[in-house]
Image (cartoon, rainbow, N blue to C red):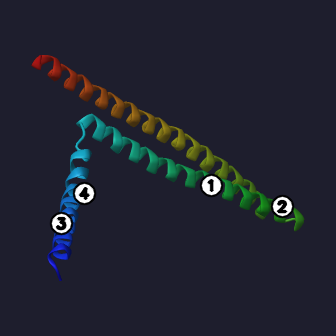
């Protein structure tokens, strides 16, 4: 190998090492956020998780209603009063489950909004602090 090939290889290795170092350091500095922003993000995540659970509950309630309806119709066809009543009961329980899921969904959306607002307030406070420090230096 001649000197040119060796120097190109070495400079390429140095460049890769430097890029790797920046790739490791940059995300760490980007993640540093205010406590309000951190709390807001946590609240948002919790709200999203609750929303998913509430949606699952709503779906379960709808499915229960459909099963109850089918049971009721089957009871009517076979003149089985007990099955018909069980179907009606299952429908009511399904409606209640669905309503409960909707209420939880709304509460989760509110939690998510609160998290977003807290995060924005934290970002605004950071900007105000930085602005005050800059003015104090003048």
Q: Which residue is tagged 3? A: 11
In space, the residues marked 4 and 1 are separated at their CA atoms by 43 Å
Vertical arrangement, residue 122 with respect to residue 13, above or below: above
In space, the residues marked 1 and 2 are separated at their CA atoms by 21 Å
Look at 23% across and 59% down and name the residue there: 19
Q: Which mark is residue 73?
A: 2
Instruction: Using a 10 Å C-alpha cutoff, classify the residue at mark 2 as few (fewer than 14 neighbours), some (14 to 19) or many (20 or more).
Output: some
Q: Residue furthest bottom?
A: 1
In space, the residues marked 2 and 4 are separated at their CA atoms by 64 Å
Instruction: Using a 10 Å C-alpha cutoff, classify the residue at mark 4 as few (fewer than 14 neighbours), some (14 to 19) or many (20 or more).
Output: few
Mark 3 residue element: helix
Which mark is first along the chain, 1 or 4?
A: 4
Query: Is 21 left or right of 108, judged from the image as shown?
Result: left
Please identify the quarter of the rendering in which residue 32 is found.
top left
Q: Nearer the viewer, mark 2 or mark 3?
A: 3
Which mark is first along the chain, 3 or 2?
A: 3
Query: Is 43 left or right of 110, judged from the image as shown?
Result: left
Q: Which residue is tagged 4? A: 23
Quadrant including the C terminus: top left
Look at 74% across and 54% down and name the residue there: 88
In space, the residues marked 2 and 3 are separated at their CA atoms by 79 Å
Instruction: Using a 10 Å C-alpha cutoff, classify the residue at mark 3 as few (fewer than 14 neighbours), some (14 to 19) or many (20 or more).
Output: few
Query: Is 82 left or right of 38, judged from the image as shown?
Result: right
Looking at the image, which is closer to me, 15 or 70? 15
Q: Nearer the viewer, mark 1 or mark 3?
A: 3
Q: Are marks 2 and 3 in contact (CB under 8 Å)?
A: no
Please identify the quarter of the rendering in which residue 100 is found.
top right
């Amino acid at each position: 190998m001649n000197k040119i090939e060796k120097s190109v290889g070495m400079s390429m290795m140095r460049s890769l090492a430097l890029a790797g170092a920046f790739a490791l350091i940059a995300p760490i500095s980007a993640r540093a956020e205010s406590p309000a922003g951190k709390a807001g993000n946590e609240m948002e995540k919790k709200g999203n998780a609750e929303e998913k659970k509430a949606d699952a509950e709503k779906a379960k309630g709808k499915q229960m209603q459909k099963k109850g309806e089918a049971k009721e119709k089957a009871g009517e066809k076979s003149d089985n009063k007990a099955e018909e009543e069980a179907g009606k009961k299952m429908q009511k329980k399904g409606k209640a489950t669905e309503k409960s899921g909707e209420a939880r969904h709304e509460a989760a959306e509110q939690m998510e909004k609160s998290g977003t607002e807290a995060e924005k307030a934290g970002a605004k406070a950071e900007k105000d602090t930085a602005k005050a420090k800059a003015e104090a230096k003048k």
